[in-house]
Amino acid sequence: MATDGTMSGLVLTFLVALAASLIFTAIVRSLARRWGILDSPDGQRKLHKSQVPLWGGVAVFLAMTLCLLAARYGSIGTGPAFDRLSSLVLAAGGFICLVGGIDDYCRLGPRLKLVLQIVAALPIVILGDYVHRVALGGYSFDLGWLGIPLTLVWLIGCINALNLLDGMDGLASIVGLSTAAMMGLLAASIGNDHVAVIALILAGALTGFLAYNLPPASIFLGDSGSMVIGLVVGLLGIYGTLKTSATLSIMAPTVVMTLPIFDSLMAVVRRKLTGHRFDVADRQHIHHRLLARGLNQWQTLSILGSLCLLTGAAATFAHLVHREMLGWVCALTLVALLIRLRLFGHHELALVKNAVAGTLARLAALLGHFDPRSTLPSPGELERLPRDETWAMAVQEIKPWKVSRLEMTLSHPARCLERYGWTDAAAGNDDGPGWSLELVFQGPQGQHCDLRATGSTIPSSGFSGMTGLCQMLTVFGTHFAARPLERFDDRPGESPPSLFHGRAA
């Protein structure tokens, strides 16, 4: 347990980091305005009303540097372990802050930025500071040289996870603050005091910066800040649970970082399966989805910050009681709830199912499993048809597959455009669908076509029939998603149609 003197030193360190951040942020904000380091609104992703200075991360890093040096040469430094870790933070963090500052000024290419991120992390592993052994499920695994790429992937992943999440006033700062606080608590609970001090310094610097970064922000972190936070959090995740046996508990840092990791993975899935480059930004991150549901920025910040504290508390408790499964269950439950409540991840899951269904359909075609009951129209034929006739054709095409209900939703991230539906009245009052298939298609203007087919009995043709159904739905879904939005508003004064019912022929 910390002595009164040590506790006073920790409180003083936090307050110094906070005060230094307040001062440095005001100075950097003024310089950024003078030098034209500004983020301009574009009406699409950047919706702030006027130009906002960048380089907030420079202020955060300067405040951290001041406090780290004071801790090293003051009374709360914890010896060689603290000196070594703080040196890594200063060296690697300084380089990545420089890279981010340059990117804020003149926009580096994504490949060059990735290379420079690797350059920042590479000296850490070259000096031997990489994971040699991991603990998972009560077992320890020696990694050997594989620890080097694993550590690099973790650090680069953390850097980009916080960078991708930095899309709303105060969000990256709140997530970084919550994550640093919980990692510091976790480190202190198992005796890694040197890690706890660095986490406390980062938390203090971010607390001071938040005075300027909360909505409406007067300065942004920029890449100079989000990447520094990601790197330091990554280092805290490694060293915070590192035991004397040099064994890393992989559960703790992963569960603490559940939200940023999940958001980053969904960004990769979404951009890959929709044919977009990974570096092309979009408005489909978790905070964008919450804002689209009518929440304001303060509500969104409160929810996401609370979720980070929740996963951090779960990881700490699970580690203290030696029940790793509790941490994993908390993380997986959070992810499942976000998807199930359609708050985030459901669209990406539908894209994955769509890709799997398409792969199965192509596999069935290669194996010669064609369903002769349907002759699919060509894209050119569909383009010449009015929308209602195209929908009617889709209804006729799905009947051989024993579909009892077909629904289609045409939407844009900002609003629902149209909804169509058909129910087979001849199906009667079945106990409920025995199967359900949902495919999502994205058009060139960001519009989505969501097709959902349900049925009470599986087609007698089994695998071949279901893959044929996927192939048919893909033809119509791709067509509706690709049509220009104005084609869905070609009847003046007519509101978007609601679900309607039809009787099978």
Image (spheres, rainbow, N blue to C red):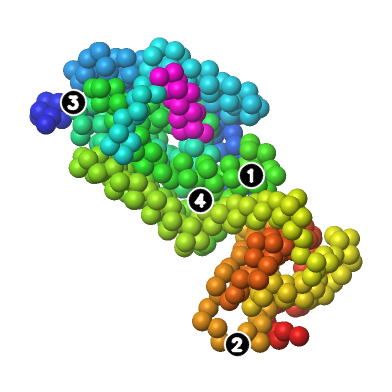
Residue 327 visible to an observer of this rendering: yes
Across and down, in percent, residue 313 comes to: 28, 45
Mark drawn on residue 286 = 4
Dominant secondary structure, magenta: helix
192 drawn magenta: no
Mark toward the viewer: 2 or 4: 2
Q: In terms of depth relative to the viewer, which is nearer, 246 or 88? A: 246
Query: For the point 46% across and 48% down, which residue is it?
Result: 215
Q: Amino acid at mark 4?
A: Ile
Choose top left, top right, bottom left or bottom right for residue 413: bottom right
Q: Which residue is mark 3?
A: 9
Mark pair 3, 4: CA separation: 38 Å
Label 2 with label 4: CB-CB less than 8 Å: no
Mark pair 4, 1: CA separation: 14 Å
Find numbered disc 1 in the image and state the secondary structure of the residue it sits on: helix
N-term mark: 1 or 3: 3
Q: Amino acid at mark 3?
A: Gly
Mark pair 1, 2: CA separation: 41 Å
N-term mark: 4 or 1: 1
Mark pair 3, 2: CA separation: 74 Å
Find numbered disc 4 in the image and state the secondary structure of the residue it sits on: helix
Q: Amino acid at mark 2?
A: Gly
Q: Which residue is mark 1?
A: 271
Q: Which residue is mark 2?
A: 428
Mark toward the viewer: 1 or 3: 1
Q: The N terminus is located in which quarter?
A: top left
- The magenta segment is 144-160
